[in-house]
Image: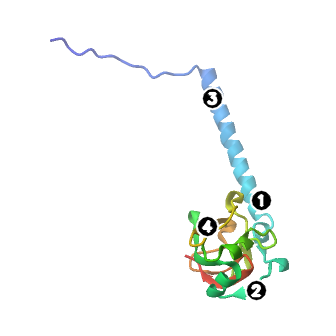
Amino acid sequence: MSDPVSVETQPVRLPDRRRRRVIRVGGALVGVAAVLVALWAWQLTANGPEAVASRVPASWARPVVDAQGLGQASGVRITRVAVTGDGGLVDLRFTIVDPDRANALHDARTPPAVVDERTGLVVHDLLMNHAHSGPYHAGITYYLVFTNPGNFVHRGGTVTVLLGDAQVEHVKVA
């Protein structure tokens, strides 16, 4: 039997000049990323909460109905409002009860929104501009995901939901 051969290995090292260049480029990329994050955070808070959410415009006002009345007015039934994404998103789920009336949800004059009842601030920007298009089908549950910058809407709070031709007050947030 032969003895195992011992091989000494040396770590591979970049030449000094190349190593310094890699460190400089990496540092520059980290610096640029930090500046971009700082600019994004500043933009969100520059003008206070109104910079990222607003109060309900008068033109958005809709008749107030209860949960049952929403089905008659807008053809939908709210199934859930929840804060997700570590507080950065509001997930609104609704089931279609009357597809013809639910088509009002596509009307640009009556955009969907969630109003935090504690502050009166409106969350209405959809995540990545996601919106349903096409006909709705009875019995199917659809969803809208709103951005919740500043975490204005909180779990356990209450909101007013504006959907189609009506609004429902005092909806509990999960």
x and y, in percent, of residue 152 in the image? 67, 73
Q: Nearer the viewer, mark 2 or mark 3?
A: 2
Q: Nearer the viewer, mark 3 or mark 4?
A: 4
Going from N to C along the chain, the mark reached first, 3 or 4, is 3
Asked whether, in this view, residue 79 is left or right of residue 36, the answer is left
Mark 3 in CB contact with mark 4 (< 8 angstroms): no
Q: Nearer the viewer, mark 2 or mark 1?
A: 2
The kind of residue on which mark 4 rests is Tyr
Residue at image location 73% in from the left, 65% down from the top: 125
Look at the image and tell me whether residue 90 can be seen: no
Question: Residue 143: which numbered mark, if any?
Answer: 4
Residue at image location 77% in from the left, 59% down from the top: 43
* In front of the other: 4 or 136: 136
Q: How crowded is mark 1: few (under 14 residues within 10 Å), some or many (20 or more)?
A: few
Going from N to C along the chain, the mark reached first, 1 or 3, is 3
Question: Residue 22: which numbered mark, if any?
Answer: 3
Instruction: Work out how far the residue at label 3 is from the one at label 4, CA to CA, in angstroms.
Output: 46 Å
Residue at image location 67% in from the left, 32% down from the top: 25
Q: Is mark 3 on a helix, strand or loop?
A: helix
The kind of residue on which mark 2 rests is Pro
Q: Name the residue under label 2.
A: 63
* In front of the other: 38 or 107: 107
Quadrant for residue 108, please give it: bottom right
The kind of residue on which mark 3 rests is Val
Q: Is mark 1 on a helix, strand or loop?
A: helix
Quadrant for residue 120, please give it: bottom right
Q: Name the residue under label 1.
A: 43
